[in-house]
Amino acid sequence: GDSVTQMEGPVTLSEEAFLTINCTYTATGYPSLFWYVQYPGEGLQLLLKATKADDKGSNKGFEATYRKETTSFHLEKGSVQVSDSAVYFCARSFNAGGTSYGKLTFGQGTILTVHP
Amino acid sequence: NAGVMQNPRHLVRRRGQEARLRCSPMKGHSHVYWYRQLPEEGLKFMVYLQKENIIDESGMPKERFSAEFPKEGPSILRIQQVVRGDSAAYFCASSSTGRETNTGELFFGEGSRLTVL
């Protein structure tokens, strides 16, 4: 079945460090791929998405590229801030073609802590 | 503009009791999803509802779990005769549209954390 695997956390970085959180997905169909973020005390928010191979999603300095050949969607940021401390979830749409109607498969989440 | 509201935020029940979790979607949203997050795991889809209709309940356990989204009022996830394995965070999400391609943009509540003693 569909699955998403994220790098194990937690990840602890100093401010202005480079961030990579790895994410791989099962290659069934042609899913859309997403990164959601959950800040302390809040619900999950969509951070960025990519709908087809080689697409790059970006938002708030974060980027992720849809790599079909490696079935990956790694999240990167060149210079993290303390305010980026949160839990990050990688997700894929349920089935081929992206008609997911909100039925997503999530990774287990990666806790990021950024120190001043 | 209120977001997705879930209550209670924390709920403690003893084995065999019933748990009711409520979710009010964002204003203007008529599509509601429930997800469950067990300890050390990612969110797992449970059910997708529209007003007065269950569209997809493929992630719901076959017994003890039910969900509804009435014409008026919040969506409710009901767990009867709870067991310790039901202890988890239950997240509700809403969207303004249903069967559309490639959105994935769900608006989540803060979750309800159920603890079964």
Image (spheres, coloured by chain):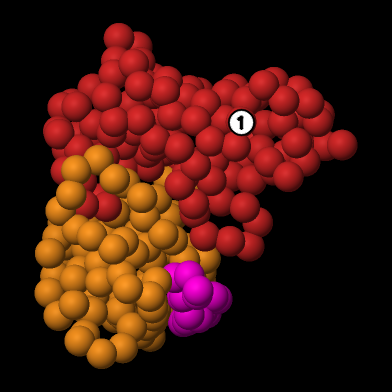
Chain colours: A red, B orange
Q: Residue at x 32, y 73 (%)?
A: B28
Residue A41 is situated, as x and y percent measured from the top left of the image, at 63, 62
Give amino acid for label 1.
Gly
Instruction: Where is residue A43? Give x, y as percent.
Output: 52, 60
From what the image shows, is residue A99 above or below residue B90?
above
Residue depicted at x 33% and y 26%? A25
Q: Is residue B63 above or below residue A44?
A: below
Q: Is residue A111 above or below residue A17?
A: below
Who is closer to the viewer here, B7 or B99?
B99
Quarter assignment of residue A4: top left
Q: Nearer the viewer, residue A83 or A113?
A: A83
Secondary structure of residue under mark 1: loop
Q: Is residue A3 magenta?
A: no
Residue B86 in sight here = no
Q: Residues within 10 Å of mark 1 (few under 14, many from 20)?
A: few
| Quadrant of the drawing holding the N terminus of chain A | top left
* Residue A60 visible in the current orientation: yes
List the single residue furthest toward the top.
A69
The foreground one among A108 and A104 is: A104
Q: Is residue B10 magenta?
A: yes
Looking at the rendering, which quadrant does residue B68 occupy? bottom left
The residue to which callout 1 is attached is: A61
Name the quarter where the C terminus of chain A is drawn. Answer: top right
The chain under label 1 reads: A
**Position of B94 relative to A8 (above/below):** below
Residue that protrudes farthest toward the right in the picture: A116
Q: Please report the bounds of the magenta region as a residue range.
A: B1-14
Point 66% across, 38% down: residue? A112
**What residue sits 31% from the left and 61% below the top?**
B95
How many numbered marks appear? 1
Residue A7 in picture, x, y percent from top left: 52, 27
